[in-house]
Amino acid sequence: MDMDSHKARASAWFRTLRDRIFASFEAIEADSAEVPVLPGAPDSPGRFETRDWIRSDPSGQPGGGGTMGIMKGRVFEKVGVNISTVHGTFPEDFARTIPGAAEDPRFFATGISLVAHMANPNVPAVHMNTRFLVTTRCWFGGGADLNPALPRAEDTADFHAAFKATCDAHGADHWDRFSKWCETYFFIPHRNRARGVGGIFYDYLECPDDAVFEANFAFTRAVGETFVEVFPRIVRRRMAEPWDEAARLALLRYRGLYAEFNLVYDRGTVFGLRTGGNTDAILMSLPPEARWD
Protein backbone atom coordinates (compact mmCIF):
# COMPACT_ATOMS: atom_id res chain seq x y z
CA MET A 1 0.00 0.00 0.00
CA ASP A 2 1.03 3.59 -0.59
CA MET A 3 0.88 4.45 3.10
CA ASP A 4 2.22 7.98 2.69
CA SER A 5 -0.65 8.76 0.33
CA HIS A 6 -3.21 7.19 2.68
CA LYS A 7 -1.89 9.22 5.62
CA ALA A 8 -1.99 12.46 3.63
CA ARG A 9 -5.51 11.87 2.31
CA ALA A 10 -6.90 11.02 5.74
CA SER A 11 -5.28 14.06 7.33
CA ALA A 12 -6.57 16.34 4.56
CA TRP A 13 -10.12 15.00 4.95
CA PHE A 14 -10.19 15.66 8.68
CA ARG A 15 -9.11 19.26 8.05
CA THR A 16 -11.81 19.68 5.38
CA LEU A 17 -14.44 18.26 7.72
CA ARG A 18 -13.28 20.62 10.48
CA ASP A 19 -13.73 23.60 8.18
CA ARG A 20 -17.24 22.52 7.22
CA ILE A 21 -18.22 22.07 10.86
CA PHE A 22 -16.85 25.52 11.69
CA ALA A 23 -19.00 27.03 8.93
CA SER A 24 -22.12 25.12 9.95
CA PHE A 25 -21.87 25.96 13.65
CA GLU A 26 -21.03 29.61 13.01
CA ALA A 27 -24.10 29.83 10.75
CA ILE A 28 -26.23 28.62 13.67
CA GLU A 29 -24.69 31.29 15.89
CA ALA A 30 -25.46 33.89 13.21
CA ASP A 31 -29.15 32.93 13.47
CA SER A 32 -29.24 33.22 17.27
CA ALA A 33 -30.66 36.75 17.62
CA GLU A 34 -34.04 35.54 18.89
CA VAL A 35 -32.95 32.62 21.08
CA PRO A 36 -33.00 32.73 24.88
CA VAL A 37 -29.44 33.09 26.17
CA LEU A 38 -27.56 32.66 29.42
CA PRO A 39 -26.71 35.67 31.59
CA GLY A 40 -23.38 36.98 30.40
CA ALA A 41 -23.72 35.41 26.95
CA PRO A 42 -21.89 37.26 24.16
CA ASP A 43 -23.79 40.12 22.57
CA SER A 44 -22.73 38.97 19.11
CA PRO A 45 -22.70 35.50 17.54
CA GLY A 46 -19.84 33.24 18.52
CA ARG A 47 -16.90 32.56 16.21
CA PHE A 48 -14.25 29.88 16.41
CA GLU A 49 -10.83 30.83 17.69
CA THR A 50 -7.96 28.55 16.72
CA ARG A 51 -4.60 27.80 18.23
CA ASP A 52 -1.90 25.60 16.75
CA TRP A 53 0.22 23.35 18.92
CA ILE A 54 3.38 21.34 18.31
CA ARG A 55 4.09 17.94 19.82
CA SER A 56 7.56 16.86 20.92
CA ASP A 57 8.02 13.10 20.78
CA PRO A 58 9.67 11.48 23.83
CA SER A 59 12.42 10.34 21.45
CA GLY A 60 13.39 14.00 21.06
CA GLN A 61 12.30 14.12 17.43
CA PRO A 62 9.49 16.31 16.02
CA GLY A 63 6.16 14.62 16.65
CA GLY A 64 3.61 16.53 14.60
CA GLY A 65 0.87 18.60 16.20
CA GLY A 66 -2.58 19.96 15.62
CA THR A 67 -5.01 22.85 15.83
CA MET A 68 -7.50 23.54 18.59
CA GLY A 69 -10.73 25.27 17.64
CA ILE A 70 -12.93 26.65 20.43
CA MET A 71 -16.14 28.67 20.20
CA LYS A 72 -18.06 30.15 23.13
CA GLY A 73 -21.26 31.64 21.85
CA ARG A 74 -24.96 32.15 22.44
CA VAL A 75 -26.20 28.71 21.29
CA PHE A 76 -22.94 26.82 21.83
CA GLU A 77 -21.91 27.52 25.41
CA LYS A 78 -18.64 25.75 24.58
CA VAL A 79 -17.73 23.72 21.53
CA GLY A 80 -14.31 22.36 20.68
CA VAL A 81 -13.31 21.02 17.27
CA ASN A 82 -9.73 19.78 17.18
CA ILE A 83 -7.63 18.22 14.46
CA SER A 84 -4.25 16.60 14.88
CA THR A 85 -1.62 14.65 12.97
CA VAL A 86 1.02 13.16 15.25
CA HIS A 87 3.74 10.57 14.96
CA GLY A 88 6.61 9.14 16.95
CA THR A 89 7.20 6.28 19.33
CA PHE A 90 4.83 4.93 21.98
CA PRO A 91 6.15 4.44 25.52
CA GLU A 92 7.02 0.76 25.95
CA ASP A 93 4.23 -0.10 28.39
CA PHE A 94 1.60 1.74 26.33
CA ALA A 95 2.81 0.15 23.08
CA ARG A 96 1.78 -3.24 24.41
CA THR A 97 -1.85 -2.08 24.54
CA ILE A 98 -2.01 -0.88 20.91
CA PRO A 99 -2.50 -3.32 18.00
CA GLY A 100 0.71 -3.79 16.05
CA ALA A 101 2.82 -1.59 18.35
CA ALA A 102 4.32 -4.28 20.58
CA GLU A 103 6.44 -5.41 17.61
CA ASP A 104 7.45 -1.85 16.67
CA PRO A 105 6.45 1.13 18.85
CA ARG A 106 6.50 3.69 16.04
CA PHE A 107 3.08 5.17 15.19
CA PHE A 108 1.17 7.71 13.13
CA ALA A 109 -2.25 9.07 14.08
CA THR A 110 -4.48 11.68 12.47
CA GLY A 111 -8.04 12.62 13.30
CA ILE A 112 -10.75 15.06 14.30
CA SER A 113 -12.45 15.28 17.68
CA LEU A 114 -15.52 17.36 18.53
CA VAL A 115 -17.54 17.97 21.70
CA ALA A 116 -20.34 20.55 21.90
CA HIS A 117 -21.91 21.67 25.18
CA MET A 118 -25.02 23.71 24.53
CA ALA A 119 -26.42 26.68 26.45
CA ASN A 120 -30.07 25.63 26.10
CA PRO A 121 -30.85 22.47 28.14
CA ASN A 122 -33.30 21.43 25.42
CA VAL A 123 -30.45 21.11 22.90
CA PRO A 124 -28.43 17.91 23.33
CA ALA A 125 -24.68 17.88 23.76
CA VAL A 126 -22.85 15.83 21.16
CA HIS A 127 -19.55 14.06 20.62
CA MET A 128 -18.02 13.04 17.30
CA ASN A 129 -14.59 11.85 16.30
CA THR A 130 -12.96 9.94 13.47
CA ARG A 131 -9.34 8.91 13.19
CA PHE A 132 -6.76 6.89 11.24
CA LEU A 133 -3.94 5.12 13.07
CA VAL A 134 -0.87 3.35 11.72
CA THR A 135 1.53 1.02 13.55
CA THR A 136 2.65 -2.20 11.89
CA ARG A 137 -1.10 -2.35 11.19
CA CYS A 138 -3.51 0.42 10.23
CA TRP A 139 -7.15 1.10 10.94
CA PHE A 140 -9.95 3.65 11.17
CA GLY A 141 -12.07 4.33 14.22
CA GLY A 142 -14.57 6.86 15.45
CA GLY A 143 -18.27 7.51 15.76
CA ALA A 144 -20.83 9.99 17.02
CA ASP A 145 -23.19 9.92 19.99
CA LEU A 146 -25.94 12.20 21.28
CA ASN A 147 -25.87 13.32 24.91
CA PRO A 148 -29.05 15.12 25.99
CA ALA A 149 -29.70 16.25 29.54
CA LEU A 150 -33.42 16.24 28.64
CA PRO A 151 -33.86 13.44 26.09
CA ARG A 152 -36.40 13.91 23.30
CA ALA A 153 -37.58 10.85 21.40
CA GLU A 154 -37.74 12.78 18.11
CA ASP A 155 -34.11 13.88 18.36
CA THR A 156 -32.87 10.43 19.30
CA ALA A 157 -34.81 8.80 16.47
CA ASP A 158 -33.54 11.38 13.96
CA PHE A 159 -29.91 10.94 15.03
CA HIS A 160 -30.13 7.14 15.00
CA ALA A 161 -31.92 7.02 11.64
CA ALA A 162 -29.28 9.18 9.98
CA PHE A 163 -26.40 7.00 11.17
CA LYS A 164 -28.28 3.78 10.48
CA ALA A 165 -28.71 4.85 6.86
CA THR A 166 -24.99 5.60 6.65
CA CYS A 167 -24.07 2.28 8.21
CA ASP A 168 -26.47 0.35 5.98
CA ALA A 169 -24.91 1.93 2.88
CA HIS A 170 -21.44 0.71 3.84
CA GLY A 171 -21.90 -2.67 5.50
CA ALA A 172 -24.82 -4.99 6.19
CA ASP A 173 -23.75 -5.47 9.80
CA HIS A 174 -22.40 -1.99 10.52
CA TRP A 175 -25.45 -0.55 12.31
CA ASP A 176 -26.02 -3.60 14.47
CA ARG A 177 -22.34 -3.84 15.44
CA PHE A 178 -21.52 -0.18 15.85
CA SER A 179 -24.71 0.98 17.60
CA LYS A 180 -24.34 -1.82 20.16
CA TRP A 181 -20.65 -1.00 20.55
CA CYS A 182 -21.65 2.60 21.26
CA GLU A 183 -24.06 1.50 23.99
CA THR A 184 -21.35 -0.66 25.56
CA TYR A 185 -18.52 1.84 25.24
CA PHE A 186 -20.40 4.85 26.62
CA PHE A 187 -21.77 2.97 29.63
CA ILE A 188 -20.61 4.25 33.01
CA PRO A 189 -20.20 1.27 35.35
CA HIS A 190 -19.90 3.23 38.59
CA ARG A 191 -23.22 4.96 37.81
CA ASN A 192 -24.82 1.91 36.19
CA ARG A 193 -26.16 4.00 33.35
CA ALA A 194 -25.37 5.13 29.81
CA ARG A 195 -23.72 8.50 29.21
CA GLY A 196 -26.20 9.41 26.48
CA VAL A 197 -28.77 7.98 24.07
CA GLY A 198 -26.33 6.32 21.70
CA GLY A 199 -25.29 6.56 18.10
CA ILE A 200 -22.34 4.61 16.70
CA PHE A 201 -18.84 3.72 17.85
CA TYR A 202 -16.30 1.72 15.87
CA ASP A 203 -12.62 0.94 16.19
CA TYR A 204 -9.93 -1.28 14.65
CA LEU A 205 -11.57 -1.10 11.21
CA GLU A 206 -8.41 -2.53 9.70
CA CYS A 207 -7.04 -1.81 6.25
CA PRO A 208 -4.91 -4.77 5.09
CA ASP A 209 -4.86 -3.61 1.45
CA ASP A 210 -5.76 -0.65 -0.75
CA ALA A 211 -9.27 -1.86 -1.55
CA VAL A 212 -10.22 -2.23 2.10
CA PHE A 213 -8.61 1.12 2.91
CA GLU A 214 -10.79 2.80 0.29
CA ALA A 215 -13.94 1.14 1.66
CA ASN A 216 -13.19 2.03 5.27
CA PHE A 217 -12.10 5.55 4.36
CA ALA A 218 -15.36 6.04 2.45
CA PHE A 219 -17.32 4.92 5.51
CA THR A 220 -15.36 7.23 7.79
CA ARG A 221 -15.98 10.17 5.46
CA ALA A 222 -19.68 9.28 5.40
CA VAL A 223 -19.79 9.36 9.21
CA GLY A 224 -18.49 12.94 9.09
CA GLU A 225 -20.93 13.91 6.34
CA THR A 226 -23.83 12.46 8.32
CA PHE A 227 -22.86 14.38 11.42
CA VAL A 228 -22.74 17.67 9.49
CA GLU A 229 -26.21 16.95 8.15
CA VAL A 230 -28.07 15.69 11.23
CA PHE A 231 -26.74 17.51 14.31
CA PRO A 232 -27.23 21.09 13.08
CA ARG A 233 -30.82 20.14 12.19
CA ILE A 234 -31.45 19.00 15.77
CA VAL A 235 -29.84 22.17 17.17
CA ARG A 236 -32.03 24.41 15.04
CA ARG A 237 -35.12 22.45 16.09
CA ARG A 238 -34.51 23.12 19.80
CA MET A 239 -32.36 26.23 20.21
CA ALA A 240 -35.24 28.73 20.56
CA GLU A 241 -37.20 26.67 23.09
CA PRO A 242 -37.54 28.36 26.49
CA TRP A 243 -36.09 26.82 29.62
CA ASP A 244 -36.17 27.47 33.37
CA GLU A 245 -33.78 27.08 36.30
CA ALA A 246 -34.89 23.50 36.91
CA ALA A 247 -33.90 22.57 33.35
CA ARG A 248 -30.57 24.37 33.73
CA LEU A 249 -29.89 22.45 36.96
CA ALA A 250 -30.67 19.16 35.19
CA LEU A 251 -28.19 20.13 32.48
CA LEU A 252 -25.42 20.97 34.95
CA ARG A 253 -25.90 17.71 36.83
CA TYR A 254 -25.85 15.78 33.58
CA ARG A 255 -22.59 17.48 32.65
CA GLY A 256 -21.06 16.06 35.82
CA LEU A 257 -21.85 12.60 34.49
CA TYR A 258 -20.30 13.49 31.12
CA ALA A 259 -17.13 14.72 32.80
CA GLU A 260 -16.84 11.54 34.88
CA PHE A 261 -16.86 9.35 31.79
CA ASN A 262 -14.31 11.42 29.92
CA LEU A 263 -11.89 11.55 32.83
CA VAL A 264 -12.22 7.92 33.93
CA TYR A 265 -12.97 5.79 30.89
CA ASP A 266 -12.48 7.60 27.59
CA ARG A 267 -9.84 6.01 25.34
CA GLY A 268 -9.15 9.23 23.50
CA THR A 269 -8.27 11.01 26.74
CA VAL A 270 -5.88 8.22 27.71
CA PHE A 271 -4.32 8.06 24.21
CA GLY A 272 -3.72 11.79 24.08
CA LEU A 273 -2.20 12.04 27.54
CA ARG A 274 -0.01 8.96 27.09
CA THR A 275 1.36 10.14 23.73
CA GLY A 276 2.32 13.66 24.74
CA GLY A 277 -0.62 15.44 23.17
CA ASN A 278 -1.71 18.97 24.01
CA THR A 279 -3.41 18.81 27.42
CA ASP A 280 -5.79 21.70 26.71
CA ALA A 281 -6.88 20.08 23.44
CA ILE A 282 -7.35 16.69 25.11
CA LEU A 283 -9.47 18.12 27.92
CA MET A 284 -11.54 20.42 25.71
CA SER A 285 -14.28 17.76 26.05
CA LEU A 286 -14.97 18.89 29.61
CA PRO A 287 -17.99 21.18 30.05
CA PRO A 288 -17.58 24.86 31.01
CA GLU A 289 -19.72 24.37 34.10
CA ALA A 290 -21.07 21.30 35.92
CA ARG A 291 -22.54 20.25 39.27
CA TRP A 292 -22.37 17.15 41.44
CA ASP A 293 -25.02 17.95 44.07
Image (cartoon, rainbow, N blue to C red):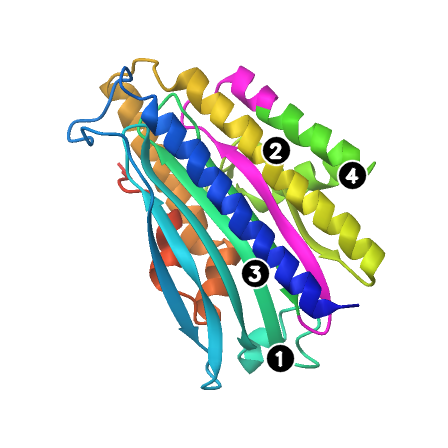
Q: Is residue 37 above or below residue 288?
A: above
Q: Is residue 190 visible?
A: no
Picture quarter with the N terminus:
bottom right
The residue drawn where x is 47% and y is 64% is: 272
Q: Amino acid at mark 1?
A: Pro
Task: Identify the mark nearer the N-term, 4 or 2.
Answer: 4
Between disc 1 and disc 2, the foreground one is 2
Residue 90 lies, in percent from the top left, at 55, 77
Residue 236 lies, in percent from the top left, at 43, 20
* Residue on which disc 1 sits: 105
- Residue 103 figure quarter: bottom right
Picture quarter with the C terminus:
top left
Query: In the picture provided, is 151 more to the left or to the right than 250?
Result: right
Crowdedness near tag 1: few (<14), some (14–19) or many (≥20) residues, C-alpha within 10 Å? some
Task: Identify the mark nearer the N-term, 1 or 2.
Answer: 1
- Residue range in magenta is 135-158
Q: Residue furthest left?
A: 40
Task: Identify the mark nearer the N-term, 1 or 4.
Answer: 1
Q: CA distance from mark 1 to mark 3?
A: 16 Å
Q: Give the structural element (helix, strand or loop) at label 2.
A: helix
